[in-house]
Image (cartoon, rainbow, N blue to C red):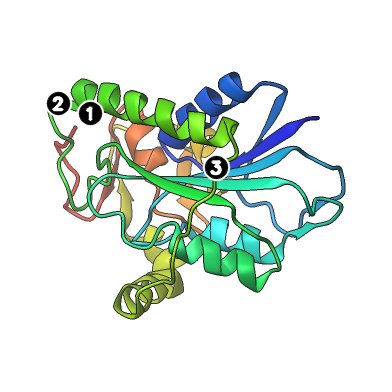
Amino acid sequence: MANIIFYFTGTGNSLKIARMVSNKIGNCEIFSIGSNQGITINKEYESIGFIYPVYYWGVPKCVKDFISSMTITNNEKTYVYAIASYGGFKGDGIKILNKLMLDNGIKLNYGKTIRLFSNYIINFNVPNDIKKRLDKCDKKLESIIDSIQHKKTNSTGKPNGIVGKFYNKFIETVSQQDKYFNINSDCIGCGVCKEVCPVNNIEIVSNKPEFQHHCEQCLACLQFCPKHAINYNDKTQGKK
């Protein structure tokens, strides 16, 4: 029986995890969440996985919308799991997802967070020991994948009220935060930013990127710009 993984990634960390899980469990489809909503799953799967980064102590808005609008049928015995990567504080990255699923009649059997490093350079500097952290992550991920292969279960608990208030405030404003991006004169209009944006938030107009106000703050556009022409206010210039 087939397996499927739904993932959201900005700069590639969650995609890497999804590929590692897929390679281990085998016979697995990988599907990018992106801007997709209202998906219906009728095909029966052995397992369904959700892999994403923790944003503002919770789940990315597009993941929230995806879970809330999806329909799963004919999968009453399917093993459902989630892996949430984080850089600083894991918050309620799994707990909030679990509540969203319960509200939509989906049971989460297993959920784990895994620490990578923060690449949200609006607030943080990229650490110098990235390779060491990634090696440590890979080892921990092996244990998580083993648990998934053996269909282990765990309890995620309920979201924290204070965390929830902070997260909900982010969700209300995140789509408009792209108004703070600015493009300097080094931009060559190559369109890389448009191609890497996981939620199709960028259009190239008059050879320059224009943001469409459904941003996720993943910073893929900024991180992958070959000319470092995209910045956020005055907070990201010169950072790795």
Side of 130 relative to 72 (left or right): left
Q: Which of the labelled discs sits on residue 11, or is there none?
A: none
Q: Which residue is mark 2?
A: 129
- The earlier-in-sequence mark between 1 and 3 is 1
Q: Residues within 10 Å of mark 1 (few under 14, many from 20)?
A: some
Q: Nearer the viewer, residue 18 or 190?
A: 18
Check whether the beta carbons of the residues at disc 1 and disc 2 lie within 8 A of each other. yes
Query: For the residues carrying marks 1 and 3, which lies nearer the camera in this image?
Result: 3
Q: Residue at x 40, y 47 (%)?
A: 218
Q: Which residue is mark 3?
A: 152
Above or below: residue 74 compared with residue 126: below
Q: Which quadrant holds the N terminus?
A: top right
Check whether the beta carbons of the residues at disc 3 and disc 2 lie within 8 A of each other. no
- The earlier-in-sequence mark between 3 and 2 is 2
Q: Nearer the viewer, residue 106 or 205?
A: 106
Side of 118 relative to 39 (left or right): left
Q: Position of residue 223 (x, y in %)?
A: 33, 35
Callout 1: SS: helix
Q: CA distance from mark 3 to mark 2?
A: 32 Å
Q: Which residue is mark 1?
A: 133
Side of 222 relative to 75 (left or right): left
Q: Disc 1 residue type?
A: Arg
Q: CA distance from mark 1 to mark 2?
A: 6 Å
Q: Disc 2 residue type?
A: Asp
Q: Residues within 10 Å of mark 2 (few under 14, many from 20)?
A: few
Above or below: residue 213 compared with residue 182: below
